[in-house]
Amino acid sequence: MEEFMLQLGNGLAVGGIYALIALGYTMVYGVLKLINFAHGDLFTLGSYLGLTALLPLGVAGGNVSITAVALCLGACLGLGFFLSMRGKKSAGQGSGAGKPGTVAFGSSRWTALFGAAVLLAASAFALRALFAVGLFPLVGGVISVLLAAALCVGLVAVVGFLLERMAYRPLRRSNRLAAVVSALGASIFLQNAMMLAYGPDDLVYPGDILPSKSILRIAVCLVSFLLMCALYWFIQKTRSGTAIRAVAIDQDVARLMGIDVNRVIAQVFMIGAALGAAAGLMLGLYYGKIRYDMGLVYGLKAFTAAILGGIGNIPGAMLGGILLGVIEALGAAYISIAWKDAIAFLVLIAILIFRPTGILGERTADKL
Amino acid sequence: MKSVRAIVFAFILALGLCVPALAGVIKIGLMAPLTGPNANEGQDMRKVVELLAEELNKAGGVNGDTVQILVEDDGSDPRTAALAAQRLSTAGVPAVIGTYGSAITEASQGIYDEAGIVQVATGSTSVRLTSKGYKLFFRTSPRDDDQGRVLAATAQKLGSKKLAILHDNSAYAKGLADEVQTALKKQGGTEVVFFDAIKPREQDYSAALTKIKGTSPDLILFTGYYGEAGLLLRQMREMKWTVPMLGGDAANNTKLVDIAGKDAAAGYRFVSPPMPGDLDSADAKAFLAAYTAKYTSMPSSIWPVAGGDAFKVLVQAIKAKGAKPQDMAAYLHNGLKDFSGLTGPISFDAKGDRIGDIYRLYQVDADGKFILQQ
């Protein structure tokens, strides 16, 4: 019994990561009916950028460098960009339909952004100073993780935006196969870019940032769950969420209703990428070792989880991820470690035979 | 000024003397995992071989000919390797160095043999590679069953009564795990209480570890690679489980300590050929100094250096018998005796295996350093 509980815990920890990545797949699929194969690599990028942010901020070494400042600026740009798009959209809706919005580089917003960036950079310096005198290791650790999270999530959201802009938007009206091939191409591009930028070696997170691993383990599950709830609330209860649901139902009609479809889709990609980046950072913190090609395995598993729960369905992605993790752990425990993937996918096939659209059913507009 | 002029003159003269020889370029193929899961080994292998070729050409080449290295990426993938082998086969090379993984080498063996090209593998230790009767195949790495014997003996020397064996289902790690199990069964005294495989390139092995813990072994042998070994050590420590762990030569990489963390890695033992830094011949020391000067770091393991040895024996064969593959192979089989390579003396037996036992036992100390055990 004790072993069973342990294995259940093992499965939940793995499943939490799967679930978080699966959310990104499901978001994009729900709106565009496109499997974003580059999502696994955005996840990897998140853990690489998180490491880049943590190294200068962290305990292990390095100084506050140009990298940290650049990361701060980039993250603020990403965040501000996202906010500005939301703001413009509601403004556009307020002033009436039919006016295609352009992202106005309104001076006040960008001034505020610049201020925020400087503030963040300053706090990074302050943090480093805190460590230099060895004060508050736990508080400092948590702060630097949160800071790194803000940085890498913001930056990866920008990459997600660029990806949509360059690799998917030009193909939106063409054959669906073309978009799939473009997604695969983007995945290979990102993977190789990371290999060339960071080297082919495994990279290792500094081990002394957060003191306790057992807390981290619970944190992984908890953060996944909270992010899922937040996402669900965002989609169901906010104005932007309503726009996303409208675009998911029918892009053309949504456009006629005055929704800027391009902007909404860009938002969806940014949110998906941000969730992936959060998962990447948590994976790095929890397991320590990251690798440029790990997005392949995790992407595949998360994709499976999304299908298992019902693709396009947000609670389904969560359920699918947790379930896949638990099935893997129990399969390893009671049948065979080497066969655990085979067992997990056997269960997947069985479930899909009886429920072809996944456990909670495929996306219909009101479920997303 | 005068001396500079003299040097320039000498250089021009040398160039002039070289002109007839310039026509002669000997191409040697290098097939290495430049991308994929073992890309770091492949990248280092390329650096080693290219630096050796550069040094050789600077010193006048071989028999007056310059050596040119043609590099192909095998991506640690059998299909990619087969394509790479086909490209090299049509490029007019008499010999090919490579490659690292056993399964990858295996995918290319037939192609090179059919094309009549000498192949010297550098990190491929699977036994069956040399039992197929390929006359042109050699390796500068030892064989798994050598290592299996040494590992089984080490487990017994460490006093293990209940051993858990874990591999990663790769041709290399599974072969090694099988060898150890067979050797232990023959000798008796150590019972194998667990034998299974984990999936490489995953992050979470806690499910496997929880299961192994249930069989309460007094020693764990993991025959796979350093990345997984590091994660296993790290996750064992997080489970607060303190059973000692032993590994094979694929664990021989300093990244293991980074991944596991110093506390978790301390006490870990592995059996391996000596590490680049422990090579004590004057040749090796000089070469590694040049390597470090050029690339700012040591090769990360012995296998890229074994790639350098493959290059050296090929050059030696060309020097002795010319660049005809058949003649080179005959020389490597019979003529080459205790050639002083970077990784130690090199001779080959009739099957193309390297002769002699080069394994050592290492232990990780509290600072994360790999200490050679006597």
Image (cartoon, rainbow, N blue to C red):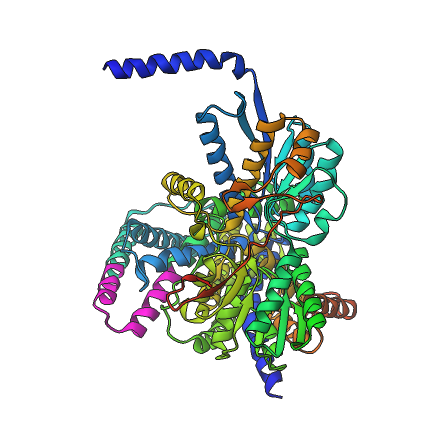
In the picture, residue A125 is in which quadrant? Answer: bottom left
- The quarter of the picture where the N terminus of chain B appears is top left
Question: Would residue A94 be seen by someone viewing this image from the given angle?
Answer: no
For residue B51, above or below residue A100: above
Find residue B311 and report its horizontal and vertical position in percent. 55, 36
Q: What type of secondary structure mainly makes up the magenta span?
A: helix
A129 in magenta: yes
Nearer to us in this view, A14 or B52? B52
Residue drawn at (41%, 67%) of the image: B365
Q: Where is residue B113 in the image (x, y as percent from the top left)?
A: 73, 36
Q: How many marks?
A: 0
Q: Nearer the viewer, residue B295 or B82?
A: B295
Q: In this view, does A341 lie above or below A219?
A: above
Which x, y percent locates residue B17? 46, 12
Asked if B183 appears above or below B162 in the picture, the reply is above
Magenta-drawn segment: A124-150
Q: Is residue B107 rendered magenta in the image?
A: no
